[in-house]
Image: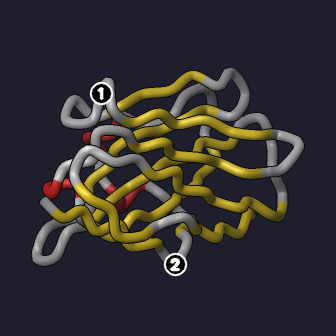
Amino acid sequence: QVQLMESGGGSVQAGGSLRLSCAVSGNIVSSLCMGWFRQALGKEREGVATLYYGTSYADYADSVKGRFTISKDNAANTLYLQIDSLKPEDTAMYYCAARTVSSSCPPLGAGASVWSTWGQGTQVTVSS
């Protein structure tokens, strides 16, 4: 079991950048899958990126490809989400999630329910 704590959110203007962090503590294993999700007001939580700890293989939602980059720092036990060219529609609460898997992360389309561990979230607000 791991514990997650996000940070790095804030209010920025469109076109700006943010780097979100997720501090990971507990039983970190190579079969751990990490993900970033976001939830805008009145909308369902959607997955934006996943990363498999063992291979660092990353996957992205089509809506964020080219602007979002998921990465990790093993020494710091931290997961990151670099967000560039921010748009007002990126405004949402961003959550870090984790689950153990056999060989690869679940597809983003599988939804939030297949993830077992969540952080408390960090708010990103983008103004036009």
Q: Is residue 4 left or right of residue 24?
A: left
Secondary structure under the numbered disc 1 in the rendered image: loop
Above-or-below relation of 48 to 21: above
Q: Which mark is residue 120?
A: 2
Q: In 3D space, how far apart are the residues under numbered discs 2 and 1 (Cα atoms)?
A: 25 Å
Q: How many marks?
A: 2
Q: Is residue 63 left or right of residue 28?
A: left
Q: Quadrant of residue 64?
A: top left
Front-most of residues 127 and 80 = 127
Instruction: Assign the N terminus to one quadrant of the image.
Output: bottom right
| Circle 2 crowding by C-alpha within 10 Å: few under 14, some 14–19, many from 20 | few
Q: Quadrant of residue 25?
A: bottom right
x and y percentages locating residue 38 in the rendered image:
32, 60
Question: Residue at image x 64%, y 70%?
Answer: 5
Question: Residue at image x 34%, y 48%?
Answer: 16
The residue tagged 1 is 65
Q: Is residue 1 left or right of residue 14?
A: right
Q: Quadrant of residue 71?
A: top right
